[in-house]
Structures are given as structure tokens and as C-alpha cells.
Amino acid sequence: MTHFAATALRLLGHEVVVFNYERENQVERVREKLGFRQFLAYKNRQLLALAEATKPDVFFTIYGRNHDAATLQELKRRGLPTICWWLDDPISLAQNYIPLHLYDFFFSNSRGTAPVYRHYGVDTPRFLPVAVDPAIHRPLEDIEKQYDIVFAGDWHPTRERVLLELARHHHLTIIGPWQRRIPKNSPLRPHFLRFGYFTPDEMALLFNQARIVLNVHQWYQRWTYGINPRLFEASGCRAFQLTDSKEEIPELYLPNVEMILYDDAAALPELLTHYLAHPDECARIANNAYTRTLRDHTYVHRMEHMLRVCGLSG
């Protein structure tokens, strides 16, 4: 997502300097092994040195878990507006990881968590969902539909429970790092295309090959708000999507016109059977979602909105 956001900012005509907190060479690997806190302190010194050398106008971070308070205070002392885009709501709240009060602007992938952030000192928490990069999340030419129902994502016990029930009725195609999470005799294992993480390109290909993309938020039936990336990525590939309902979705996509929502996974076997039998209906809905995504939901749209809200778009 950092790559997608940086690319979008460059497309908008801005110069972007990206700082990577990951270890970049063997020396840094040794430093990290000597102590993670010391390693982060070292990387934060690097960040401040880069800021001194490049003289940026704005400091923007996604998540921001690695920036300590002293570093943020120094950036603010130098006159830089500080912006954080937190993308783990509602399952993992930002105040547990970052000094919220040191950000001038705070954006979240969930409207529903705004009261929590106001409680922890954010004057105006703002909703900014993720998006698509049309160079990656896109329809592919001459790709045939090979899989009835595709699920791509990390393991979660809620997802495992939903997919186990569906596997009794339908053949699924699953991809994700589940191998160490499910029993060796799990009925889901034959449904895996492969185990492990996947690249954005691999995901886009799989979505192009799917008759139905199934989206199950990790927080299904726990929170009624918060949007995950799959909502947009599948639509950017012009894939037909079934997703659990979230409060923010109707302002982003028209239910029953641009995607199909379910409140209870118990309805999924009937929904899946219906839509597998009506490919023309699926194609119409998927095309509607694709059109909306290109119009409203690219990373360029998100970065434009963010800069405008922060008074930095002039």
C-alpha cells in the first residue's frame, strides 16, 4: 500500500521520497539481531537525516508503527505537517501502537472507530478507505473463468468457520498463508490452490479467473463497520463480489447494483448457487462495480482527497 500511495502521489505531480524501515543489507540485519529497539532507534536517526537532506514539505506515513514520539516531535519542530493513514481498524486500534496526539491529521479505514480516536486525543479522525492501482488491479484480456468461488486472504478463525460450512456445499478455491493454522486433516485443505502469501499480481490474476470472489472481513459479526482492501481490489479486476455488509459500503458501492452484500453467512449457499447459475447477472453487476471503482476508488482519488483535507493540494 505504501508503494501504491507513493505512485499515486507521483502521478499527481508530487516528488516523493520513500523511507523503508525494513533491514536493507547485511549490516542492518546484524543490527536488528542485536536488539529491535536499538534497530528502530537507528532507523529513526536515518529518517531524520533523510528529512534534513531532502527538506520535505510533509511527513506522511501508513500505519506509522515504527516512528517513536521523539522522531515525530523533531519532525514537527522542523515545521512538517504529520499525517498518518491507519489501515488496521477495527481489529487493531492505532492508539495501542502509535502516539496519536503527535499527528496533525489522522485517517482510518473505518468510520465506526472515530469515537474511540476522539477519546484518545484525535480532534478530527477522518475516514479514508483503501483503493486500487489500475495498473495492478485490472481486468486481464483473454482470461477464462476457471474457478467458481475464490477466497484470497489471511487465516482467521471466523473465516475458517465460514469456509468450512461453505465447503460442504460448493467447491472453493482458496489462497493464503493458512498451512500452519488449520489441522492436517482439515476438509479445507483440498480447496487450496496453494498455501502462502501472494503478490498483488497473483491476486489480480486469480480474481480475473473467478466467477465469484467471496469477501469475508476478519471482523465479520464482530463489528459492523470497517472496510478491507479486497472490497476494492476485486472490483478493480471487474470481478463479481459477494461481501459481508459493512456500514460504509453503501456510500462506496450501490448494494445489489454494484455488488451483493450478505448480513449472515448462512445465506451464502443459496446466494452462491443463484449467482453461479446466472453469469450474465454477475457480469452486469461486476461491470457496474468496475466502472464505479475507476471513477471513485483509485489511490489517486485517495491521495487527492487526503491532500485536500489537509490543505496541501494547492
Image (tube, helix red, strand yellow):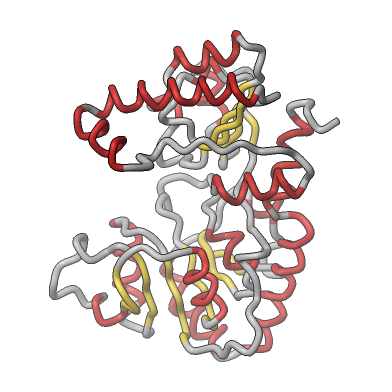
Residue 140 sits in which quadrant?
A: bottom right
Instruction: Where is residue 154? Give x, y as percent.
Output: 36, 59
The relative height of residue 82 versus residue 212 in the rendered view (above or below) is: above
Instruction: Where is residue 117? Give x, y as percent.
Output: 53, 24
Drawn side of residue 301 relative to residue 246, left or right: right
Drawn side of residue 71 relative to residue 34, left or right: right
> Residue at 19% across / 61% down in the picture?
180
Which residue is at the far top?
77
> Residue at 79% across / 59% down in the picture?
295
Is any part of residue 151 visible from this angle? yes
> Residue at 41% across / 46% down in the picture?
222
* Residue nearest the viewer, comparing 237 with 53: 53
Instruction: Where is residue 46? Give x, y as percent.
Output: 45, 25
Residue 24 sits in which quadrant?
A: top left
The relative height of residue 63 versus residue 235 in the rendered view (above or below) is: above
* Residue nearest the viewer, comparing 310 with 19: 19
Is any part of residue 124 visible from this angle? no
Which residue is at the far left?
184
* Residue nearest the viewer, comparing 238 with 253: 238
* Residue nearest the viewer, comparing 17 with 155: 17
Number of numbered markers: 0
> Residue at 86% across / 30% down in the picture?
314
Instruction: Where is residue 147? Give x, y as percent.
Output: 46, 85
The relative height of residue 23 versus residue 297 in the rendered view (above or below) is: above
